[in-house]
C-alpha cells in the first residue's frame, strides 16, 4: 500500500488532499494504539478542517513499525470489528516515519523545526522513567541515567523532549506542546514534573523557561486495540486490495478527552466524534483507569491463569463477567461525578465492549507490565475504598490474581514469562518460599514502592488477599465468590 489510487471500493479513503498536507505533529511511539486512535482522530480532523497537521512518527526503539510505514508512504489500514462484520479505513495523516537509533540527529532536527508544534507520545508507562513511589524521576531507569549523563545525545523520551525544547529556546523558536497519550493518571502533569526534574539537574535557565512557556495538557484515551495478527493483515489486504504490514484492528468505540492548553495551535479534534476538549481531564481519566482498565486487568489475570486466551472468552464465563461488573461498580464508588457521564451506563457499555466477539484481545497482552499499571488501576482506588469503609473485596481478588500470575507458572507446571520490568525482583522475592497464599502475598507486599501503606497496613484486607491467593494456587479456575 503505497498510494491511494486503485484501492478496493470496500475501503474508506482520506477525505482530504494528502499532497497538500504538511507536517505539524511529531509522534513518539507509532504502536498499534496510536495507529488505531491518535492518527485516525487526526485524519478525521483534517477532513473536517484543513490545516498543516500532518504527522511524522518516530520509533525510539525497534524499527519494524516505522519501516513498514515508510515502505507504504505512511498509509495503513484501520480495521473496525464488531458483530456485524469488519470495515476498513485507510488512514492518511502520517507523512513520514523515523527510527531514532538510526538517525538521532535527524530526529533532533525535526524536534527543533518550527513547523512541528505538537510532540505527542504513546510510549507506554515504563518508558517515561517515572518512579511511582516518589512521583518523580526513576534515577535508576537506563534512559534517565544515560540522558542525564549525555543530554545532547538523548535516547529516551524525556531526554529527547528536553533537548528539543533546549534547541528551540536557544534559537528563539516557540516551544512545541508535549502531549502524553499514555495510560498514566494526570499524564500531562506527570510528564511536566519529570521534564522539570530532569532540567533542574542539568540547566536551571532551561528549567525556568519550560516552566513559564510550555504547556503539558493531560489526555484520556480509550479504544480497545489488540495486537495485530496474520488475520489482521489478511483482512486488510482483502478489503483494500493491497498488502498492508502496518494494519491494525480495533473496536467501533473511540474516545479522547483532551485538556485544551496548547502553545501554538492544534488540529480541529473537537469536530471528530468521540473527541472532547475540556479545561481539566482528571475526572474522565480516573473513570477510565479505574472502571475500564481496572476491570480489564482483573479479567486478564484471572483469565490468563484460568486458561482463557482472549478477554471475549473470559466474558463467556458468567461468574467472571459478573465479577467484572461488580468491580466496575466498586470502582465507581471511588469516583466524583463525571460531567456528562452516567456511570451505570458507562459500566454497561464496558461490559458490551469486553464481550465483543470480533475483538481478539489477549489476556496475556493486557497482563504485561503489571507493576507499572497496578497503582493507578487498582491500588490507589483500593486504598480510597478502604478509607471510606468499603471492604474492597474485588480489589483483593484482582491483587490475588496478579500475585498468582506473578508466580510465573501454570497449575500444570508450565512456565511463562511475566513480561514485567520488575520480573527479576518478583522472582527473587518468591524463589525460596512456600507456595502458599500467605507466604507469597507477604513477600510480594514488600516489593519496594508498589503497595501503599494504606493497603499493607490493613490486616483484614491483606488477609483477604492471602485467602483468595490460596484458593487460586489450589485451583486456577475455582470461583472466588
Image: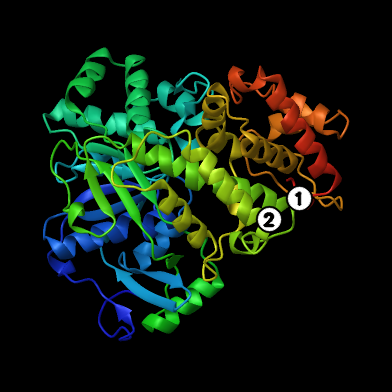
| Element carrying mark 2 | helix
* 132 w.r.t. 102: above or below: above
**Viewer-nearest residue: 100 or 268:** 268
Rendered location of residue 131, percent (x, y): 50, 24
Q: In which quarter of the image is the N terminus?
A: bottom left
The residues bearing labels 1 and 2 have C-alpha atoms spaced at a distance of 7 Å
127 relative position to 481: left or right: left
* 370 w.r.t. 102: above or below: above
Q: Which residue is drawn at 48% across and 36% down?
A: 333
Count neighbours of disc 2 (C-alpha within 10 A) and say few if under 14, some if 14 to 19, many if 20 or more: some
Residue 212 lies in quadrant = top left
Rendered location of residue 15, percent (x, y): 19, 71
Which residue position holds label 1? 479
Q: Which residue is drawn at 69% across and 60% down?
A: 308
Rendered location of residue 62, percent (x, y): 48, 50
Rendered location of residue 209, percent (x, y): 19, 20
- Which numbered dot is residue 319? 2
163 relative position to 348: left or right: left
Q: Do the residues labelled 1 and 2 touch (CB within 8 Å)?
A: yes
Q: Residue at x 17, y 26 (%)?
A: 213
Amino acid at each position: 500500500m503505497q498510494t491511494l489510487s486503485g484501492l478496493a471500493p470496500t475501503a474508506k479513503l482520506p477525505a482530504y488532499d494528502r499532497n497538500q498536507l504538511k507536517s505539524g505533529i511529531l509522534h513518539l511511539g507509532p504502536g498499534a494504539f496510536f495507529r488505531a486512535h491518535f492518527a485516525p482522530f487526526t485524519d478525521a480532523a483534517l477532513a473536517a478542517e484543513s490545516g498543516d497537521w500532518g504527522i511524522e512518527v518516530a520509533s525510539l526503539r525497534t524499527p519494524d513499525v516505522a519501516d513498514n510505514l515508510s515502505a507504504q508512504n505512511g498509509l495503513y489500514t484501520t480495521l473496525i470489528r464488531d458483530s456485524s462484520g469488519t470495515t476498513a479505513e485507510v488512514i492518511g495523516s502520517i507523512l513520514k516515519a523515523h527510527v531514532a537509533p538510526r538517525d538521532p540527529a535527524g530526529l533532533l532536527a525535526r524536534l527543533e523545526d518550527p513547523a512541528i508544534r505538537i510532540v505527542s507520545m504513546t510510549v507506554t508507562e515504563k518508558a517515561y522513567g517515572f518512579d511511582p513511589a516518589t512521583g518523580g524521576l526513576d534515577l535508576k531507569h537506563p534512559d534517565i541515567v544515560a540522558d542525564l549523563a549525555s543530554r545532547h545525545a538523548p535516547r529516551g523520551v524525556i531526554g529527547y523532549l528536553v533537548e528539543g525544547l533546549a534547541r528551540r529556546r536557544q534559537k528563539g523558536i516557540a516551544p512545541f506542546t508535549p502531549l502524553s497519550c499514555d495510560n498514566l493518571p494526570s499524564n500531562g502533569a506527570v510528564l511536566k514534573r519529570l521534564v522539570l526534574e530532569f532540567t533542574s539537574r542539568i540547566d536551571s535557565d532551561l528549567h525556568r523557561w519550560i516552566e513559564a512557556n510550555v504547556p503539558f495538557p493531560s489526555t484520556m484515551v480509550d479504544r480497545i486495540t489488540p495486537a495485530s495478527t496474520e488475520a489482521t493483515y489478511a483482512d486488510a489486504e482483502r478489503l483494500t486490495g493491497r498488502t498492508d504490514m502496518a494494519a491494525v484492528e480495533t473496536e467501533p468505540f473511540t474516545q479522547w478527552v483532551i485538556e485544551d492548553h496548547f502553545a501554538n495551535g492544534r488540529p480541529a479534534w473537537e469536530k471528530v466524534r468521540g473527541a472532547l476538549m475540556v479545561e481539566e481531564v482528571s475526572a474522565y481519566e480516573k473513570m477510565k483507569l479505574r472502571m475500564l482498565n481496572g476491570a480489564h486487568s482483573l479479567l486478564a489475570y484471572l483469565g490468563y491463569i484460568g486458561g482463557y486466551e482472549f478477554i471475549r472468552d473470559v466474558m463467556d464465563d458468567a461468574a467472571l463477567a459478573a465479577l467484572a461488573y461488580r468491580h466496575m461498580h466498586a470502582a465507581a464508588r471511588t469516583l466524583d461525578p463525571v460531567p456528562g457521564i452516567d456511570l451505570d451506563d458507562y459500566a454497561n457499555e464496558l461490559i458490551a465492549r469486553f464481550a465483543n466477539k470480533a475483538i481478539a484481545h489477549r489476556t496475556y497482552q493486557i497482563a504485561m507490565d503489571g507493576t507499572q499499571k497496578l497503582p493507578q488501576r487498582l491500588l490507589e482506588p483500593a486504598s480510597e475504598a478502604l478509607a471510606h469503609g468499603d471492604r474492597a473485596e474485588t480489589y483483593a481478588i484482582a491483587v490475588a490474581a496478579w500475585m498468582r500470575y506473578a508466580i510465573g507458572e501454570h497449575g500444570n507446571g508450565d512456565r511463562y514469562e511475566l513480561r514485567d520490568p520488575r520480573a527479576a525482583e518478583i522472582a527473587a522475592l518468591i524463589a525460596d518460599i512456600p507456595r502458599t497464599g500467605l507466604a507469597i502475598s507477604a513477600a510480594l507486599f514488600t516489593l519496594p514502592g508498589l503497595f501503599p501503606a494504606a493497603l499493607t497496613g490493613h490486616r483484614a484486607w491483606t488477609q483477604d488477599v492471602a485467602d483468595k491467593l490460596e484458593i487460586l494456587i489450589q485451583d486456577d479456575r475455582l470461583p472466588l465468590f
